[in-house]
Amino acid sequence: MNATKAPDVRHLVDLDRYPIDDLESPKRREIIENAKASLRENGLASFPGFLTEKGLATCVAEVESLKSKAYARNLQRFIYPQETLDPSLPADHPFRKPQPLVQRMLSADVFDGESELRKIYEWGGLPPFLAEILGQSVYQIADPFLSLAVIMMNNGQTHDWHFDGNDWVVTLLLQRPEKGGEFEFIPHTRDKNNPGLDRVEAVLRGTSDEVISVSQEAGTLVLFYGDQSVHRVAPSYGERDRMVAAFSYDNAPGFVFNEKVHMNASGRTTPLYVSPRLSATAATN
Ligand SMILES: O=C(O)CCC(=O)C(=O)O
Ligand SMILES: [Fe+2]
């Protein structure tokens, strides 16, 4: 068997509902057009039931079995990516107000060559599908730590209000917590000319009437413009974890983050596992 052959995901992804690897399918075309419209309107496109019931159970069982390898993070992060920080601004200015990020993370290197979740990431169906929706080239990244990750939150853990450093992100919700854990956002909060300060201040005061709260079902794939729309994961309550997988892409093959980012995500700089398929992608770059 060729180690770099793209994996099959028929046992995980609902390809009848989402025939996204069949480039001739009219259903695929319709899904893409709907996603484009949804991104234009809200900056978010969601694909409920992306995983089959069995596929979802398989992925959750896999994450459960790897849970002890999670890296705990308890940080304060700025809402706006840090390069906009200006120390002359008042301390309560939204640029200077840190927000908690408290979660446990399984980095990509925890998912070895047998991993089912890794199969979904390395499958050839998603990048061209995302590329058509976004109107740009999309490649899996070669980063052994952050190509995929699973983030877990329970017992009040949260990823509070922020804009992302990347333009867009793909998440796959695997499990909801007992209570809370909703994904909340204000569509198109900011653009190149306007940082959306009034809207962010209203969110922080708890007076915003623009927040959309998405109560996703487990098994839903989401594509989201995280640099445009301020968002958070509301605190997750109860013992059962909110579990979400995050998939990273770039507009060219071979992308790898630096060691500082690896350390911050996993507490390691030497990966436990390196995928031959993704490093092969890098080598052809
Ligand atoms: O968990 C989610 O649904 C989104 C997480 C998020 O906003 C992030 O990781 O930047
Ligand atoms: Fe985010």
Image (cartoon, rainbow, N blue to C red):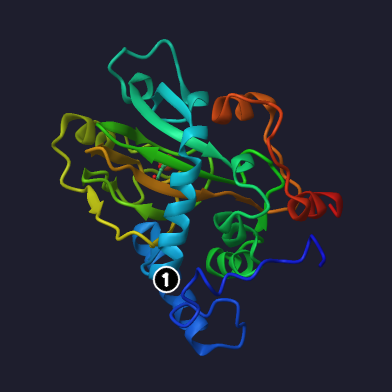
Determine the quadrant in which ligand 1 lies. Answer: top left
- Please tell me whether residue 240 is drawn above or below residue 260 in the rendered image: below
The x and y percentages for residue 192 are 47, 43
Occupied quadrant, residue 40: bottom left
Residue reaching furthest front? 65
Which residue is at a point 20% across and 35% down the rendered structure image? 202
Q: Is residue 255 left or right of residue 52?
A: right
In the rendered image, which quarter contains the N terminus?
bottom right
The x and y percentages for residue 87 are 43, 11
Occupied quadrant, residue 93: top left
**Residue 65 in view of the camera:** yes
**Residue 224 in view of the camera:** no
- Mark 1, ligand 1, within 8 Å: the answer is no
- Say what secondary structure mark 1 lies in: loop
Which residue is at a point 22% across and 36% down the rendered structure image? 203
Q: Is residue 54 left or right of residue 121?
A: left
Q: Is residue 80 left or right of residue 137?
A: left
The x and y percentages for residue 190 are 38, 43
Which residue is at a point 57% across and 29% down the rendered structure image? 266
Occupied quadrant, residue 191: top left
Q: Nearer the viewer, residue 240 or 260?
A: 240
Q: Nearer the viewer, residue 37 or 249?
A: 249
Name the residue that disc number 1 marks.
Answer: 52
The x and y percentages for residue 82 are 49, 24
Check disc 1 and give the amino acid type: Thr
Within 10 Å of disc 1 (Cα), the crowding (few <14, some 14-19, many 20+) is some
